[in-house]
Image (tube, rainbow, N blue to C red):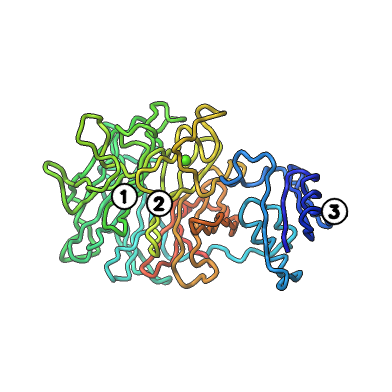
Amino acid sequence: MEVDQFSTPTGVLKALKEKGHTEGFLIDKHGMRGYDREGTVVDACGTHANPPHRQVSQRGNDERRITLRMPTQVFSPVIRRLFLLFAASTGLWPQARCFAGAAPPKHELEVAFPHLHFTRPLALVDPSDGSNRLFVVEQRGRIYVFENRSDVREAEIFLDISDRVNSKGNEEGLLGLAFHPRFRENRLFFLNYTAYPPRRSIIAKFVARKDDPDKGDPASEVQLLTYAQPYENHNGGQLAFGPDSMLYIGVGDGGSGGDPHGNGQNLRTLLGKILRLDVDHPDTGKQYGIPADNPFIVTGGSGRRGEIWAYGLRNPWRFSFDPANGWLWAGDVGQDQVEEIDIIQKGKNYGWNIMEGSSCFKPQKGCDTTGLTMPVVDYHHDVGVCVIGGYVYRGTRLSDLAGAYIYADYGSGRIWALRYDGVNPPVNEELMHSGMPVTSFGVDRNNELYLCVFDGQIYRIK
Ligand SMILES: [Ca+2]
């Protein structure tokens, strides 16, 4: 069976005649219709008010077309429906869902630790120290620790630095926590938080107490790096160690709207970037080193910042590494129209503020896309308003999600599973409309996935 999708009925019928396909499908603003070789509508979906979720690979094609093939010997109504559901999940073809039949959602959220309640939790982190503890970051400047079992009764305060954290703005506060890969030996952990005055971001390291591993020492702070924040929004916030033991930091464009200072494209500022630092080998006079293989190291006077790993980002709030292959996945929060998921690679330019997702931003039409790296997927603001980057699922509880990148939207509460191998087109499946203000994802030592939600609870997918 071979199926073509065109944006005009003529295209569909032409392909049916020329290629002898069994069926063709038309997708347009009214929905989706299937045609047989005689041009008869054989299946149809209702009107869809919203345009389909658009993929990068579709950009600029007036006549949108995909060709899908499957061996005829396995063709059956059941296989056909599965096949169409697969097509639907790519996002290219959301209306194909109704061809496949409406199925109840396979997954929903459940509270992971019913006895625990937090205030604006923003991150859940495993210390990778062999203990079965989890750490939850609260925006106001607290970190809690607790044993990872669903009946745990209470969480202890691991660290309280609310005295030095500015969390007045919606996007300000204690935003990120990363444990050193050798935390068990050196007890070092790293924070990303905002302070005021002056308005700035601080990347700092702290030590946990030797006599009590459930207590961080607030007096042990050593600031590695600070950078000015011109506005209260777009502070990024993630920091995490990569498989190379380097510390990666997500930095927003500095805020306001539209990146008024052009920070995303400016290699002389840390704003609008992913940074990569070596915390184990500090350069002279610094608390960190710039790795020799960072892409923008210069010896001359260009002013480019050697800390930069990738640029052209607006607000890479959450990113993570896939433990299976080391890929760095990021959710980059969009302006007023487009949210995007990127795979971050050394030295690449992710487009902001020339582009917002795979759409031109400045100028709004005919922007120069030369040298820009497009998102793996993006979605428009009819689907959600603020992407929350997640994790590639490498746990065992949810076998059907193995290898899928799970991410969410803070505004709509939708949660997706995205599969992408770097070669074939991405397959993006919507898992659920949770209705929850998801702020972040985290994983435990077994790579099981958790969600932090602004209702104060930690959830997991079941
Ligand atoms: Ca981008």
Q: Using a 10 Å C-alpha cutoff, classify the residue at mark 3 as few (fewer than 14 neighbours), some (14 to 19) or many (20 or more).
A: some
Between 390 and 310, the one nearer to me in the picture? 310
Whether residue 242 is situated above or below residue 357 in the rendered picture: below
In the figure, 132 relative to 276: above or below? below
Residue at mark 1: 248
Q: Amino acid at mark 2?
A: Phe
Count of numbered circles on the image: 3
Q: Position of residue 431 (x, y in %)?
A: 58, 59
Residue at which label 3 appears: 41
* Front tag of 3 and 1: 3
Q: CA distance from mark 1 to mark 2?
A: 9 Å
Which amino acid, by three-letter code, is at mark 3?
Val
441 left or right, relative to 89: left
Q: Determine the image quadrant of residue 223.
A: top left
Residue 354 seen anywhere in this rendered image of the structure: yes
Residue at mark 2: 319
Where residue 414 appears, as percent x and y from the top left, is: 57, 53
Label 1 sits on a secondary structure element that is strand
Residue that appears at 63% across and 63% down: 105
